[in-house]
Amino acid sequence: MRKDNAVLLLLDVKHPYDREILQGITHNPSPMARWMQPEVMTISEANLVKLDRFCGVIADFDKPGVAAFCEKLSLPLVAISGSRLSLPSQAHLARVSPDSFAIVELIVQSFLAKGIRRVGFFSGVPAFTAPWVKERKFALAKIALKYRLEY
């Protein structure tokens, strides 16, 4: 039985990025945000409840298993990711991700304003495996060529 306006949020509230997403959703002054009744769960918890009580899902697709779990859902779905590369192109799926190229462009503009023309890419993620890391590394390489930076 569908619970009016209940939206399943598949987020990990222990992760700072997911807490920011949750805060943005719950503290948004728009009428849509006030209408929504968010319920935060992990995939393990969501597997234990009847999903037909929700009118939609907002899910962090950077978490392992979330995309596979959401494939079997027939609910409206918003997929959140730190990278456009990791989001599937399904018709029923709304996708939200940062523009890595614009982020890197802003960083480079800041460096150039300070006279810095020698740049490098460093990441705390091992072996550049995360899609957002690959996306931003590619953007920096492309932008470094554009501005003829030492890279």
Image (cartoon, rainbow, N blue to C red):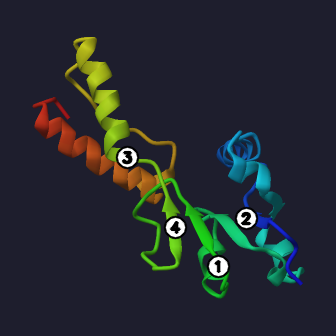
The residue singled out by tag 3 in the image is 100
Q: Tally the numbered discs.
A: 4
Mark earlier in primary sequence (3, 2): 2
* Among numbered discs 1 and 3, the one appearing first in the sequence: 1
Whole-number angstrom distance, CA of label 4 to CA of label 1:
12 Å
Q: Secondary structure at mark 2?
A: strand
Q: Is residue 31 above or below residue 114?
A: below
Sequence order check, earlier mark of 4 and 1: 1
Measured in 3D between alpha carbons, the distance from the residue under mark 2 to the one under mark 4, in whole angstroms, is: 15 Å
The residue singled out by tag 2 in the image is 10
What is the quadrant of the C terminus in the image? top left
Question: For numbered disc 1, what is the local secondary structure?
Answer: helix
For the point 48% across and 58% down, which residue is it?
Answer: 130
At x 59% / y 66%, what residue is drawn? 78
Q: Which residue is mark 4?
A: 94
- The residue carrying mark 1 is 70
Left or right of 83? Residue 112 is: left
Secondary structure under badge 4? strand
> How far separated are the C-alphas under marks 3 and 2?
23 Å
Q: Amino acid at mark 1?
A: Cys
Dot 2 or dot 4: first in sequence order is 2
Query: Please, what is the three-letter code of the amino acid marked with disc 2?
Result: Leu
Residue 13 x, y percent position in the rendering: 78, 51
Q: Residues within 10 Å of mark 4 (few under 14, many from 20)?
A: some
Tag shown at residue 101: none
User: Disc 2 or disc 4, which is closer to the eye?
Assistant: 4
Kindly check if marks 1 and 2 are in contact, taking CB atoms under 8 A apart as contact: yes
Q: Is residue 33 visible?
A: yes
Q: Amino acid at mark 3?
A: Ser
Distance between mark 1 and mark 3 Cα atoms: 25 Å
- The mark nearer the N terminus, 1 or 2, is 2
| Residue depth check, mark 4 versus mark 1: number of the one nearer the observer | 4
